[in-house]
Image (tube, rainbow, N blue to C red):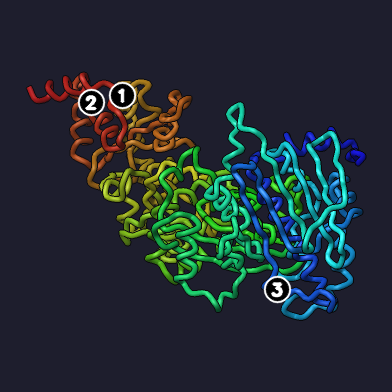
Amino acid sequence: MARRQFKTESKRILDLMINSVYTHKEIFLRELISNASDAIDKLYFRSLTDDAVTLSKEEYRIDITLDKEARTLRVSDNGCGMDEAGLNENLGVIAHSGTLQFSEQELRERAGNLPDDETHAGHSPSVRLVGQFGVGFYSAFMVSKRVTVLSRAYGSEQAYLWESEGVEGYSIKAADKPSHGTEITLYLKDDADGETYGEFLEAYRAQSLIKKYSDYIRYPIILDGGEEPVNSMIPLWRKSKNELSADDYNGFYKSKFHDFTDPAFTVHYTVEGAVSYTALLYGPSQAPFNFYSRDYEKGLQLYANGVLIMDKCAELLPDHFSFVRGLVDSPDLSLNISREMLQHDRQLKAMGKSIEKKIKGELERLLEHEREKYEEFYKAFGLQLKYGLYSGYGQNAELLKDLVLFHSLAEEKPVTIKEYVEKMPEGQQHIYYICAETPAKAALLPQTERVRGKGYDILCLTEDVDEFALKMLRAYDEKEFRSVSGEDVGLTDEEKEEQKTKSEENKDLLAFINEALGDKVNGVTVSARLGRHPVCLTSEGDLTIEMEKVLSQMPHGGDIKAKRVLELNANHAVFAAMRSLFVTDREKLKVYANLLYTQALLIEGLPVDDPVSFSDDICSLMV
């Protein structure tokens, strides 16, 4: 029997198949099961219009047999089978796909004659067939030193045996097989150099791979002659939503994604059109322990007709919704030569955009109709939404601006920016905010006094990213964001005139204090924002004191400083004492100036420049 050579530069291409295309060796079992499923599909669809095919739907099956002693793994099906020409064409020409040819020709002719229940979305022939490029079979050589394929075409009495040890070629000879179908036998490589090919002969290992990759193949997969199928066959997401209860969805989520709590929300929908797919999405109730770390990997499980292609397809989820778990099943995936890799094409982008809109819509629904649940969810993932608002130079600001919450000092609860704006009193021109560790500390800051005194609410920003996010957003509904600690707090003309007058009256005193403090501050001024407090620290320019705190914690941010301004309350008794000292004792006035500056640092939560000098100044006044 003459050995035949693979075509199309077989040695080079087959070497790539074995060593380069697939990342994980375990993929071979998924590929062989998918091929077996395709072979059954072809015969089943033929039976819909050909009375000569008498098998019922329940008779189709895929068998996997493990033999540790012989060191073989066998995958058998009772599908359409192949004759000698089919074996030579499909297995002798690398990258030739019988499934693709079948899809393009025979199924096109048959589709118009299929019953309605067979052409339903998710079950039409063009959707159900998986194999497209004819390369999955060769993944068997990653784990095998020899592969045999015994096949008998349906309606034929003659079977044939295809055999190969890899790149050197293959042989085909007549053989005996009692029934139609295909039987692929893998003679596994010896364990060596840290590779344990024998693990695939363990029943628990084979079962775990079937559950992982092929759980939703619609034909029963029987392992070692067992009585019950290993696979579930019918995916939950292919059932109608009317058939499923909340318990069904929640139970699937907990089992699939190993969570102990019910999800905060569930989204289940199907899209039909240029890009057809079904998505089942979950919003967890609590963040995984590593969610805000570099170790966390986002992505949705990606299926092609029930066959797992990727465990985490990052392209389907934007970073700001990276907390979402779930899956997408589509017949329209553009796969390249390996099912492990996806082309970054418009189909995938279209799915991702649709998924993004669905997630946003569900979050808006929660926010409006289940506020308590949304606020609990927000405690876990609100920070991620704020990062999304800030990242990419604010390119997602419009998408996310109505989903973020900030604590309202007036209402003492989380509110959206939209809710804040809707409750602004007449005459308020800006959206005010304050940065602090907690809302309680924010309420005590002296910078809030004048704004709150006018009856204006203030949003409390407690996360490092908050102010950066609002700076990127800039405005909401044409209302600018203003920090109550910022350079321009939005004074009225009367307030500006009053501040200007008092500054002019005390310009010599302010200049002396400024000189006494040296480069600690960029200026000293009379404040228009203080009420009962004598002093506060504010900033000039875009870089605020809160931003300085955040940047100083970064590896290369220690030299970045905000332009600090010491503001004094001209109506306070301390200011009157300083005016008196400016006339009678300017050395003591220097001590007062340093004390007030240090007091402002402490109120702002900034480190004291010289604690020893601060202590000495207090002692000198006490004595």
Residue 49 image position (x, y, % from top left):
84, 77
Amino acid type of the residue that numbered disc 3 sits on in the rendered structure: Lys
Residue 429 image position (x, y, % from top left):
46, 57
Residue that appears at 59% across and 75% down: 240
* Residue labelled with disc 1: 512
Q: Quadrant of residue 612?
A: top left
Amino acid type of the residue that numbered disc 2 sits on in the rendered structure: Phe
Question: In this view, which residue lies farthest toward the left?
Answer: 623
Residue that appears at 19% across and 36% down: 574
Is label 2 in contact with label 1 (beta carbons under 8 Å)?
yes
Residue that appears at 28% across and 44% down: 446
180 or 622: which is nearer to us?
180
On-image quarter of the N terminus: top right
Q: Quadrant of residue 581?
A: top left
Secondary element at tag 1:
helix
Amino acid type of the residue that numbered disc 1 sits on in the rendered structure: Phe
Q: Earlier in the sequence, mark 2 or mark 3?
A: 3
Q: Is residue 449 visible?
A: no
Can you tell which mark lies on residue 582?
2
Q: Earlier in the sequence, mark 3 or mark 1?
A: 3
On-image quarter of the C terminus: top left
Q: CA distance from mark 2 to mark 1?
A: 8 Å
259 or 533: which is nearer to us?
259
Can you tell which mark lies on residue 338?
none
Apparent side of residue 223 relative to residue 264 in the rendered image (left or right): right
* Residue labelled with disc 3: 57
Apparent side of residue 611 relative to residue 134 in the rendered image (left or right): left
Q: CA distance from mark 2 to mark 3?
A: 100 Å
Number of marks in picture = 3
